[in-house]
Image (spheres, rainbow, N blue to C red):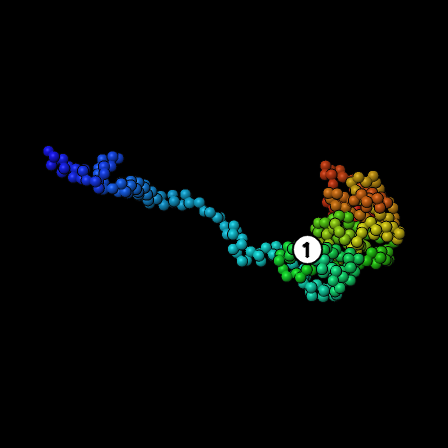
Amino acid sequence: MKNSSKKKFPGKNNKDYKKNSDYGFYSKNSNHSEKNERFMNNSAKNKNFENLNQNNKKNPFSVLKRRKPKFNSSSEFPNKNPDNHHEFTNKRNFDDWIWGKHSVYEALTSERPINRIWCTSEIFSSDKFYILLKDLKSKGVLIEEVSWNRLSQLTYGASHQGVALQLACSKTIPLEHLIDLSKHNCTNPIILALDGITDPHNVGAIIRSAEAFDCKGIIIPQRRSAGLTGTVAKVAAGALEHLQVSRVVNLNRALEELKKNGFLIVGLSGDGQLSISNFLEKAPLVVIVGSEDKGISLLTQKKCDYLLSIPLKGKTSSLNASVAAAISLFHLSK
């Protein structure tokens, strides 16, 4: 009986063998039992994997449905595309821009029409640029002193050397010349003045209407107004070539000068007590058009001799600035 027991369990009394109570058989060491556990787990995973493969063979699109792309397009990697910088700079049209010391200096000395200049304090105070920039500022050109970083942002990292400018589509004339030209062969000329209209599309449309109703000129303030950019010229549809424009440093001082020369100052306002259809004064006129949201500024309203309103019969409370200018010029030019 002892021998039969030894045959059934040949390694029971051997120190190298230990009973594995989980599975009811003898293993040589404990590490071997851990391997058996991993083998059993892996076998179960393998069975699941085989079942998955069989399902995938039946439905080959099941795996594709479970896959979620991490990125939908290459736009999520803007820094890795070398052409992104060029595409970004193309969003702004730089055809009318000039930068760099030598290029800008030649443009200033050649008397080309200029809309706006950006420069650092070092450029503005230098002997080479100071006199030129000061003279242009007195003529109505908007000059801004900005930091080097701000100028780099405006030019999208170009080598600007501290100065850049934007050309204008048409030359401007001094206010004195505009007054003399408006009175030439005309007893009751009309001059249009813009107050705070910054949208170039509105400015272009106003210029087009002013030329159509034989307006003698337009006054644009240096600040808080759109300049004579390419957009303005395009919307004006050629009218800018036949209309004189004067860009003044201060609009209120320009109105005082016009009063001295016999002009009546008329402002368009929704709060005006006098309807434009009842205005019968015959004299040289300056018609002021304000912005759509704020209208004519309070200080400019005090300079006006008359505040005229356009009667509206509908529910709309106001008109577009260019439409209001066209209606007023139609009535006043009769």
Quarter residue 161 falls in: bottom right
Whether residue 296 is visible here, answered yes or no, is: yes
Point 83% across, 43% down: residue = 307
Residue 299: where, in percent of width, then height? 81, 45
Amino acid type at mark 1: Ser
* Quadrant into which the N terminus falls: top left
Q: Is residue 197 above or below residue 1?
A: below
In the image: residue 9, left or right of residue 119: left
Q: In the rendered image, which quarter is residue 170 located in?
A: bottom right
User: Residue placed at 46% from the left, 47% from the top?
Assistant: 70
For this orientation, the residue located farthest to the front is 15
**In the displayed image of the protein, which residue is found farthest to the top?**
1
Residue at x-position 13% and y-position 38%: 7
- Answer few, some or many: residues within 10 Å of disc 1's Cα (few below 14, many 20 plus, some between 14 and 19): some
Q: Can residue 236 be seen?
A: no
- Residue 140 image offset from top left, x and y in percent: 78, 56
Point 74% across, 59% down: residue: 124
- Residue 137 position within the rendered picture, expressed as x and y whole percent measured from the top left: 77, 57
Give the camera-side residue of 102 and 334. Answer: 102
Q: Is residue 24 left or right of residue 154?
A: left
> Quadrant location of residue 110?
bottom right
Compare residues 119 and 212 and report the one nearer the observer: 119
Q: How many marks?
A: 1
Q: Secondary structure at mark 1?
A: loop
Location of mark 1 (residue): 147
Q: Is residue 73 left or right of residue 50?
A: right
- Image location of residue 119, percent across then percent down: 70, 58
